[in-house]
Image (cartoon, grey):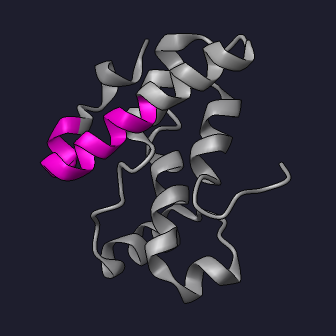
């Protein structure tokens, strides 16, 4: 199953954000090829396309999603709620067929992680 079977990211993103996300997807594939990382291109494209799935949600919706679904977040993310879009997106995509490594990358794409 691929992400587009579960979530149509184009319905959840403004045209500007969708353009950004497509660029991220293409860059992920280019970096994978340049450095011979061996990741599957389709999964990389889906990760890039959907990494900002919740980026345009308002603060209330992000905070509500975190609390209602028990999504673990850092104090830094709570203090700057726009950062909650990353863990919320990873949560929303958790049933999409993306692997754990892909979900971890989406989860931490704003602040980074040692995970």
Q: Position of residue 24 (x, y in %)?
A: 44, 37
**In the figure, is residue 56 to the left or right of 98?**
left
Question: Can I make out residue 13 in this image?
Answer: yes
Q: Residue at x 66, y 17 (%)?
A: 34
Q: Position of residue 91 (x, y in %)?
A: 52, 49
Q: Is residue 95 above or below residue 67?
A: above
Q: Residue at x 46, y 38 (%)?
A: 93
Residue that lies at the very extreme toward the right in this rendered image = 114
Q: Quadrant of residue 64?
A: bottom left
Q: Is residue 16 above or below residue 48?
A: below
Residue closest to the eye, 81 or 19: 19
Q: Is residue 29 above or below residue 64?
A: above
Question: Can I make out residue 97 in this image?
Answer: no
Q: Is residue 7 above or below residue 4?
A: below
Magenta segment's dominant SS is helix
Q: Is residue 84 magenta?
A: no
Q: Residue at x 32, y 72 (%)?
A: 61
- Tell me the quadrant of the picture where the N terminus can be found: top left
Q: Quadrant of residue 60?
A: bottom left
Q: Position of residue 15 (x, y in %)?
A: 14, 46
Residue range corresponding to the magenta coloring: 10-25
**In the figure, is residue 51 to the left or right of 8?**
right
């Amino acid at each position: 199953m691929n992400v587009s079977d579960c979530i149509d990211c184009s319905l959840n993103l403004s045209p500007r954000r969708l353009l950004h996300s497509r660029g991220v997807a293409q860059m992920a594939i280019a970096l994978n090829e340049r450095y011979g990382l061996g990741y599957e291109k389709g999964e990389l494209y889906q990760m890039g396309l959907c990494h900002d799935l919740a980026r345009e949600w308002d603060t209330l919706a992000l905070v509500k999603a975190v609390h209602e679904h028990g999504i673990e977040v850092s104090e830094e993310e709570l203090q700057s709620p726009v950062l909650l879009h990353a863990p919320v997106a990873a949560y929303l995509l958790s049933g999409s067929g993306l692997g754990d490594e892909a979900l971890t990358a989406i989860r931490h794409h704003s602040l980074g992680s040692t995970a």
